[in-house]
Each structure stands twice: as structure tokens, then as C-alpha cells.
Amino acid sequence: MNSLRPNFDFNSIILSQTSSTKLPKPPTPFLSCSYPPFHRISPDKKEPKFNDQSLITSIQRGILSFAAATAAIASICTNSPALAESLTVAFPVSRAREVNTVQRTLIETWGLIRETFVDPTFNHQDWDLKLQQTMVEIFPLKSADAAYGKISGMLSTLGDPFTRIISPKEYQSFRINSDGNLQGVGIFISVEPKTGHLVVLSCVDGSPAMRAGLHQGDELVEINGEKLDGIDSETAARKLRGNAGTTVTVKIHSEAADWQSKSGFREVKLPREFIKFSPISSAIIAHRTPDGHLSKTGYVKLATFSQTAATDMENTIYEMEKQGVESYILDLRNNPGGLVKAGLDVAQIWLEGNETLVNTIDREGNLFPITMIDGHALTRDPLVVLVNEGSASASEILAGALHDNGRAILIGNRTFGKGKIQSVTELDDGSALFVTVAKYLSPALHDIDQVGIAPDIQCTTEMLKNSSREQTSLIKGSASSLETDSCVMVAEHQLDIQEEFRGTAS
């Protein structure tokens, strides 16, 4: 990532920003500046850039410098002839070293939000004034944790639960998720946008959370007796993680029918273990058709969009093609998302040509289609995609791309409905800022945010009555529950229908 280093005066805090609105002129401007502004994303670029640290856009940011003085100056300047005035505001610098570091992080955070946040009105508030208010609140504090809390409070006024900051320690924990190994209870959680509650998206197979009977949709109320009101998902996840062999007590509220508690609340003591998982699990389902033909269906479950998801998917499909698989079921149920780039890479495994994968909308309302260039699918075999309420974010991008381009039928239940994309930027002090930088629409321009994607077919056993499929068996894979999974059975039935149609058409 390229950086722009502004010139600075020893007794000044200088932040360079380009403003799209006219800043109020101070009564007595006493500091001027001339240095390059932050670069905006060029509006003529048709395709945003992706990388692992920044999911949708590359952010160029300035290097901030603080004076070792008891008072400092923050100056916001523009180099536009039409906006030649400077806004100069005096800020006191904390004598506490750790708080002083967070003051720098505050300004860095404020600047990135100012340049990239998807809502240019900042939830209809004066974002410059919000910086001043937060700096005043941080000044008397004595600890970094309290200062980070003030930054989180500032971000909460944006009205977007997905825009947040995490401390350096929390960011290190967050990065654990990408290597496939962690010590914890094996649970995926997220903030439910409408209620702000922490809810379970899914549990890792065989994990302590699954063995304890936690379900998708359960609400986390307390962890070790600490209420979770206002706590984001990363902070809660960090509390759940810990050394293998230790335990954590979780209070859950659930409406699941198999729970004994009439109130819907219960406490569960969960052991922490080494949690190892691959994003891909697979099986080959075989059956005999009425004419005696042995048909093979490849079942592929994608648990999360990690850095290795696309490569693992490619390897799995190659292997199944060698074994004569003739149709596929891609299971995205309870997949909470992950790296957007991984979702797009997986989509290209199944699509050909110059198809649009997703449309993004920036803060100015500009629509940017992300389109394949001369793509080549690994297989053209019939495909069904399974989704449910736990399919979110990158799962919805992938499902929308395959559905809207006519590549797959969707079976299951309506998806979660997260139609926003975040960038992840490591800040100068090792903390990380998650910023919602774009909204997205499916290739057919369907809005997904807080709506989700409706499947073509819901899972009902009624649809299985006329199935011509005879005895089904697994010839590869350990997921024996597939034989009784109603959604998998419905998917197999639909693949039979597609096969019959292809046979008639030929």
C-alpha cells in the first residue's frame, strides 16, 4: 500500500484531506499548509481492486505525526482553488503515552472514514465536529482501552454495525480465522443488523458448541457473566477464544424446540479445544436410475470464504471430474462469508465468458459492475446451490452470481441479507479499521441488504414424492447425514428433472 507523507511542523498535528463540501472558515486561521491530499478512488475505474487486506478497494492513507508537546494543532487543508481556506482546530495532547498513541489512531480512523465510508453524509452528522468532540473526550483518559472505547463510540454514530475498530490484540485474534486453526469453542457469530444482537451463524462440525446444542439463530447474551450489550462480534469472539483445556460459560437465548428451559435462556459451560477445519468438505452421492445407469452427484460444502477457498474448491472439482461426477450440489448453508475476493474466485470456477459477478455502488451512487474476462468454467455439469438464513455476505455474492447468470438453481431458505462490503485496513498502531465502503447488488441488480436472496425452491418433502431416484448411497465422503438431509434430497430431485429435460431436448 502506498503512503503519502505530508510535511509537518514540529508543534502541529497535520492531516491532509480532500473535502467534497465547503468547510466552515475559522475566525482566525493561523496555520496554512500545502501538501498532497488523500487520493480518492478514481470514478473512471470500472473495476475495484481486491486484495486480502482490503476486500473491495485500495485505500491510500497519510502518515500522521504528533508533536511531543502538551498542546497540538490539527489542520485540515485543501489544495483546490475553490476550497482554499483552512480549518484549524487546537487539540490537547494527552500526557499518557498509550492514550497519546490512540489519539493518533483516532485521527487516522476519522480520516479513513471521511474518505471512504459509503454514506457521504456520515448518517447526517458533521463528521469534522465529531472528531473534535471525541478528541476532547479522550484527552482526560488514562488507559488505551478506554480511549479505543471512545473511538468505537464515534464509529457507532454512523449507524452501521459493520464499521468498527478493533485493538491490535483483537486484530491478531481476527487474523487467526484465515489459517484454519484456532483454540476456542467452534462457533461463528455476527451482529444481527436489525436488532444489534449477537447471534450464532453456525457451529463447526464436532465442535464444543455443536456438541452443546447451540443452533443457528441463537442469541448470545453473556460470556463469563459479562453482558454483551453493545459488544461487536470480534470482541465477543475474542472472549470465546482461549487456551485449549480451559472453559468459558455462555448464556444463550434460544427459541429452539429441543431446549428444556421455558424462558428460552440457559447457561452452557463450553470447553475450549483446538479447532481445525477446512473450508471444503465433500462427498460423492451415487444412485441407480430406473434404466440401470449409475449416476454420480458431487456434494461440496463450503464453510467459509478463506484465503484457500477457491484453490480447495478447484482441487475438489478436478478430483470429482476424474471420478465421473455428472452433477453438483454446492452447499452454502450457514456460510457466514469471508473474503469477497474468494467469493468472486469461486464464482469463476463455475462460470464462463464475460459474465457480471456482482455490481458495487460507491458513496457517490456510481454503479461498477465486476465482470469476468473470457472465463472458462471447470465444469458445465448441472448445479444446484443450497442456501439458508445463515448464508451471508460473500455467500450471497456467490449465490447471486450463479443464479442471475442462469448457472444454478437456488434451494433452501431466504439468505441473511448483508449487502455491504467492508475494507480492512491495519492502522499505524497495529489496530484495524473495518469500513463499509460499498453496497452491492446482484448481477440482475437485485438489492440484497437486509432483504436477502429468495431461493427458487424451498426444502419440502412434498416435492420428493414423484422422484424417480432409487437407492442412494455415498461412495466417497463421511457426511452420512446427507442421506436424510431434506434439502439435499430436494436438490437431487431437481437434478433428476434437469437430466430428464436434457435427455428429452436432445
Image (tube, rainbow, N blue to C red):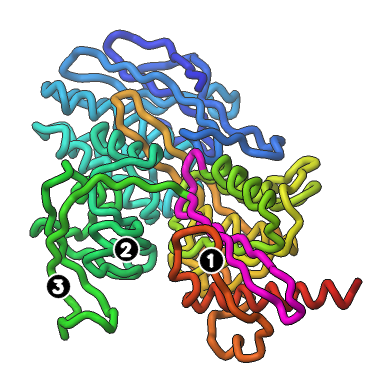
Q: Which residue is mark 3?
A: 266
Instruction: Give the percent coordinates (x, y) of residue 284.
Output: 58, 61
Q: Which residues are magenta?
A: 280-308
Q: Which of these two is toward me, 136 or 374?
A: 374
Q: Quadrant of residue 152?
A: top left
Q: Does the magenta-highlighted stretch encompass residue 479?
A: no
As shown in the figure, which amino acid type bears the numbered disc 2? Val
Q: Which residue is mark 2?
A: 200
Q: Secondary structure at mark 1?
A: strand
As shown in the figure, which amino acid type bears the numbered disc 1? Leu
Q: Which residue is mark 1?
A: 474
Q: Quadrant of the C terminus?
A: bottom right
Instruction: Give the percent coordinates (x, y) of residue 229.
Output: 20, 60
Identify the residue at horizontal 73%, vertical 76% (top origin). Answer: 292
Q: Compare marks 3 and 1 and give the one earlier in the sequence.
A: 3
Q: Which of these two is toward me, 5 or 200?
A: 200
Identify the residue at horizontal 30%, vertical 32% (top origin). Answer: 431
As shown in the figure, which amino acid type bears the numbered disc 3? Arg
Q: Secondary structure at mark 2?
A: strand
142 versus 276 height, above or below: above
Q: How many marks?
A: 3
Q: Secondary structure at mark 3?
A: strand
Residue found at the very far front of the displayed protein: 292
Tell me the crowding category of disc 3: few under 14, some 14 to 19, or many 20 or more residues within 10 angstroms, Cα based: some
Which of the two discs, 2 and 1, sits closer to the camera? 1
Instruction: Give the percent coordinates (x, y) of residue 346.
Output: 61, 48
Left or right position of 265 against 301: left
